[in-house]
Image (spheres, rainbow, N blue to C red):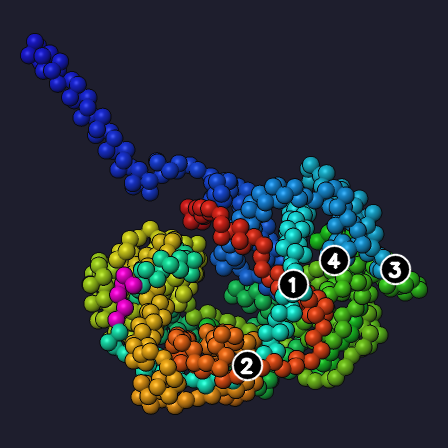
Amino acid sequence: MSVIQRIQERYAKLMAIIIALALIIFVVMLAFENGGRLFRGGNSTSIGRVNGQSIEYADFQKKVDEQENSMQSNPYGGGSGPMLQERAIEGAWNQEVNETLLNSELRKLGIKVGKKEMGDILYGPNAPDDIKKSFTDPQTGQYNGRAAKQNIDQILKMKSGTEKQLKERDQLIAYIDYLENKRLNDKYSSLFANSVNYPRWFIERQNADNSQIAKVSYVREFYSVTNDSTIKISDKEIEDYISKHKKDFKQEESRGIAYVTFSALPSSADTADAKTKILTLKPQFDTIKNTQEFLAAQGVTNFYDGYINDSIIKVPFKDSIFKLSVNGVYGPYLDGGSFTLAKLLGTRQQPDTVKARHILISTQQRDDATAKKLVDSIQKAIAGGANFDTLCLKYSEDPGKNDRATGKFNGGVYDKVTSGGMVPEFNNFIFGKPVGTKDVVKTDYGYHYIEILSQKGNSTAYKIAYLTKPIETSQETENNASNEAALFAGDSRDSKSFDANAEKLKAKGINKSFAADIKPMAFTVPGLGTKRAFVKNIYKASLGEVLEPEKVGDNYVVAIVTEVNEEGTTPVAKARPQIEPLLKNRKAAEKIKQKIGKITTLEAAAAALGGKPIETADSLRMSGAQSAFSARPLASESKVIGAAFNPSNKGKVVAEAIEGSAGVYVVRVDNVMATSLGDANVAEQRKARYQQQKQQEQYNPPTQPLRDAATIKDKRRDFY
């Protein structure tokens, strides 16, 4: 025991140190396995920082939801799915950053929107159109600001209610916030727009300069003559140029990949299988009496139980379908990615267009019996002489009773309706009954009291049922594509093997492709499709790392990271294509200048350049707008034009050769004279320039300079 005790006493401290070191190493390794989050606050809810001010995820997500709701309600199409989410996240981020920066500046300046001003925005004579539409009397066309205020105040005070009511309240709050921010943005913008000034002396000087016209003679040598393979540009020269022009070479973070794809689209066997399936249904489809019920049993839910005019029907082989006898079946035929059988259920003559008006009593707002009772009472009231418009305005629950463009009441009228444009029951009534018919029709929306006002044209209409079977990828095809991708990825663990194996795939018609400039928050990879998880995996990988196979769209993709561009300054290799031609021109200019030597006369310069011709430009203007043909080659050579109008050069050969954009010029200024520019009204010119600049400011976001100067940390990729 004494021996053991002595060992423990002697080595206890050493063992404690070893154990402590082991724990530290374990924690460090764990941190790296978790992306370093133990040291960065893995539970952080901050999605980014703007000049040190945190943007919290919960608040940001509300703005994303608002953006999505706004885009979804856009009648011109706001997109859907991942693309909609990508646009919403980007829109919310720009909104959040701009508001944070702008609010900081507004606080410094003491600019705000008071209660009275906000009331004027919402309820004043220039209230937003969407608020005006809701509170304008359709009879008088007058906007009722008081009613708008009462209604909005009531919604804002709401503490509880249905989910729909609370959602509407939140949307209203967000809309008012938007209006307030817009007004603040307008105030801030006006500080710049209204400070624009063009002094009288400036306009007068411009007029004087533009009245000058010069005649020059010159000899030129193009860079292309000298700029050959002997001129080399080193990486150091590119680097020095970037260093002097850092503002022009800012780089956003991005990545690039090379990839090969293995198609999981339906095979020929899958196509044959889909055709066999629909052929087995054809005998039953031929003889079935209740077509709608049969189609529903087969999963077809878009059957249109109505007659559609021949000119409206746009399907393959429609002429063959029209020739069928009633209850005849045509097909199967290919329509998009499906095999289709078409059954002609009936034909009739009907108008091409119809004008009708209606009053809708919705069954979504009340039970069926109550709705039927109300529409019957409306029908009786109209039959007894009641005014249709008055009842439509009061009772109709169809949004279409108001014009979409103006929001004004239109009497529930639908004009120039074509067949198929309404639900089947509505369609069959207005196209199948004569003008003047009035009756109640039941649809999925509720009960409609309809009056047919007029009908135009006449043609054959058809009722057709379509049975479709999509050509779908079988599990076997899916597995084959997945296995091929897995085999390729397993054999391609670095850049060299990836390229070698990709080369072998060419025999199968599979080619290596590239995608560049993939941003951290991208949802879509150019050439492949939309999948956020794939982009995130690209950013988790290192340069030269081969990713595991991933399905994107209809393909299994194996990719290798070929390019990693960090945020900062553009690297030499990437900037070279842009900078190298400029630096080559500079070196070519030096060679040309050495060839010319000391400048004495144009003739001597021409001879030094191997007998170059002496050219003339006789109508040079300082503005660069050259009307004479002889002057046009110099229109883009600002240095030559500047030398021509330098008073010290008049009547002389310019002492130095001029490096232009296209070549080197030796110039003699033969003459400079003033011409008349007509009646130059300085006051009108100042006014026009001021208005032009103000309009231009509308397209220059006032927050952009603030963003350029701000420190912005974007951590969205950790949350989406």
Give the residue type at disc 1: Tyr
Between residue 573 and residue 18, name the one nearer to us. 573
Q: CA distance from mark 3 to mark 4?
A: 17 Å
Q: CA distance from mark 2 to mark 3?
A: 69 Å
Residue 550, position in %: x, y?
Answer: 34, 58
Query: Circles 2 and 3: CB distance less than 8 Å?
Result: no
Residue 179, position in %: x, y?
Answer: 68, 50
Magenta region includes residue 234: yes
Q: Going from the N terminus, do you reach mark 4 or mark 1 first?
A: 4
Disc 3 is placed on an element classified as loop
The magenta region covers 232-237
Q: Is residue 432 visible?
A: no
Residue at the spot of label 4: 129
Q: Going from the N terminus, do you reach mark 3 or mark 4 first?
A: 4
Magenta region includes residue 456: no
Q: Going from the N terminus, do you reach mark 2 or mark 3 first?
A: 3
User: For residue 286, what is the image quadrant?
Assistant: bottom right
Residue at the spot of label 1: 198
Q: CA distance from mark 4 to mark 1?
A: 36 Å
Between residue 27 and residue 190, name the one nearer to us. 190
Disc 2 is placed on an element classified as strand
Q: Residue at (71%, 39%) from the top-left corner?
A: 158
Check the image and name the residue furthest to the left.
Answer: 3
Residue at the spot of label 3: 140
Residue at the spot of label 2: 672
User: Which quarter of the figure is the N terminus placed in?
Assistant: top left
Q: Going from the N terminus, do you reach mark 3 or mark 1 first?
A: 3
Query: Circles 3 and 1: CB distance less than 8 Å?
Result: no
Q: Residue at (51%, 66%) from the top-left corner?
A: 298
Give the residue type at disc 3: Thr
Q: CA distance from mark 4 to mark 2?
A: 58 Å
